[in-house]
Amino acid sequence: MLETNLESRIDAVLDALGDALQRKDIDAIVALFEEDGYWRDLLAFTWTLSTQEGKPAIRAMLESQLEAAAPVSIARDRSEPAITQDGATIGWFLIETALGRGTGHLRVRDGKIWTLLTTMSELKGHEEPRGTRRALGAPHHSRTVQETWKEKREREAAELGYTTQPEVLIIGGGQGGLALAARLRQLDVPTIVVEKFPRPGDSWRNRYKSLCLHDPVWYDHMPYLPFPDNWPVYTPKDKIADWLESYAKTMELNCWTSTTCKSASYDEAAGEWTVVVEREGVDVVLRPKQLVFATGMSGKASIPTIKGQDVFRGVQQHSSHHAGPDAWKGKKAVVVGSNNSAHDICAALWENGADVTMLQRSSTHVVKSDTLFEMTTSILYSEKALSEGITTEKADMRSAATPYRLMAELHKPVYADIRERDADFYAKLEKAGFMLDFGEDGSGLFMKYMRRGSGYYIDVGASELIIDGSIKLVSGATIRELTENGVLLEDGRELPADLIVYATGYGSMNGWAADLISQEVADKVGPCWGLGSGTTKDPGPWEGEPRNMWKPTRQPGLWFHGGNLHQSRFYSQYLALQLKARQEGIPVKVFDGRA
């Protein structure tokens, strides 16, 4: 009876919403929301990733987009039971517009919509060949001489980029570039992935040897090809590199490895790019309609400029070029930084017999790996979640259904509980001199990640080494200069060093655009990543979505795709649909709430 009552609440709201959408009655639609309600849309209405907060913003979006979106139907997804959570009734629905189909999620309180998520998961007439639509493969009938699958693949690989041009050129052969290329392959969009390293996955393979994924396996699947159910919970970097290499082959992706992009320019009149790449020592000119930077969520390595860097006799390297600890046994190392990479590198150096000091410049959020999993990730991504019917796809949609502003508020009590649960651990870290924070507003790790992509460490053992003094810690000090033999601090202390590792992070992804295209284009696009929260390294104004990620930028034909494996998997679908729509000339009206 309770379940029936819950579903009737959802039905009542959806019926009213569907009726108002059909009539294009904006007043009636807006009236269904709480005064401070949220509407997050992934393509279905806005053809971008956009969150509207409050009735005035929802009204503005509808006034701009409702006519073009032309919603056809909306109805509760009867395969998903309604539930109650956080004082709201939660339900799922299916939605169809003039151009596509998708799913949605809503939270209802006292008969009003608190949060609404609408998505487009497929374009009408351009559905993926899955399930009953899958390709036959090898025809089982008599025929004249015909290309085999192998011959067809070889011909395609030989022609694409030479006698035929790609619709999309993706720069970067890591998880982001490969996930997007796999989506585009299923949508029949000719695509080339350009990778500077010799093999797909080398962006992982070439990092320091102790690197592993800090997110659990259930969170990290790639599109179409999930990890086997005996895959380890936390994947070593060489294992994920090998998986990505095999993924590229299995998914029939056109990857140009050992290929370097040299320049790119956009022809406004032709609506295409001219991209010069060097492949096998020869310049090749490509003319894609769409150019995607899939170089991670980060830009170029940030290396501080310090007096005396030309004087220091030892080795200096950014963390992205640190191969590992093997050469540093019995040597002294200083690692500048205190986030994930700094901790991992410090621990590996110590384990291999180096005398290592971490130089912490600013406070860092630390959370134990098992605590993070138990109190946050496992709710949606775990064996327990799977046993409760929460597949990866369902988990992704549940995650997407919470607007970022609301997410920050919901995370604060969780991280307060984490701080209390591991109070002894945090007390020991602070006693060792480590500067801790839980985000400027107490919202913890994920919001720090979304706001700035840095400032945290998921503890897999290095914190205990700091607590017991195995990893020496210098915190709150600034570097005056480098000497021939070490690091001189402003307070007069000198840290002897044979090796200095700058675990100092990365710039914005638009830095790659500045290098390849022009500074003018990079400035036109603006920063990539961050929400505009006004917190450290995430200047306002508030946008409520990651800036310039997975959606149109202010430079026609230029896109940015990155993030962890979860984000690469989830958002690649929406980016691929946007690219497919443009290939087919489908009229899309993009809503830019920033304008």
Image: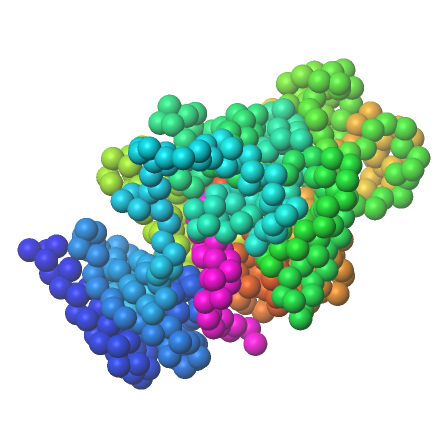
Q: In this figure, what is the number of numbered marks? A: 0
Res 439 seen here: no
Check the picture and name the quadrant holding the N terminus. bottom left
Looking at this view, name the residue that lies furthest to the left: 1
Q: Check if residue 576 falls in the magenta segment.
A: yes
Colouring rule applied to residues: rainbow
Name the side, left or right, on which 101 lies relative to 245: left
Name the side, left or right, on which 313 lies relative to 166: right
Residue 416: x percent and y percent?
43, 48
Q: Which of 389 and 243 lies nearest the eye of the viewer?
A: 243
State the residue at coordinates (85%, 31%): 486
Q: Which of 295 and 418 lies nearest the eye of the viewer?
A: 295
Q: Range of the magenta residues?
A: 568-595
Residue 191: x percent and y percent?
56, 48
Residue 519: name its quadrant. Answer: bottom right
State the residue at coordinates (60%, 59%): 289
Residue 356: x percent and y percent?
72, 25
Q: Check if residue 382 falls in the magenta segment.
A: no
Res 145 seen here: yes
Residue 200: name its quadrant. Answer: top right
Q: Say above or below: 170 vs 118.
A: above
State the residue at coordinates (37%, 49%): 128
Looking at this view, name the residue that lies furthest to the front: 144
Residue 429: x percent and y percent?
57, 34
Name the side, left or right, on which 37 lies relative to 201: left
State the residue at coordinates (61%, 51%): 165
Q: Say above or below: 235 vs 30.
A: above
Check the picture and name the quadrant holding the C terminus. bottom right
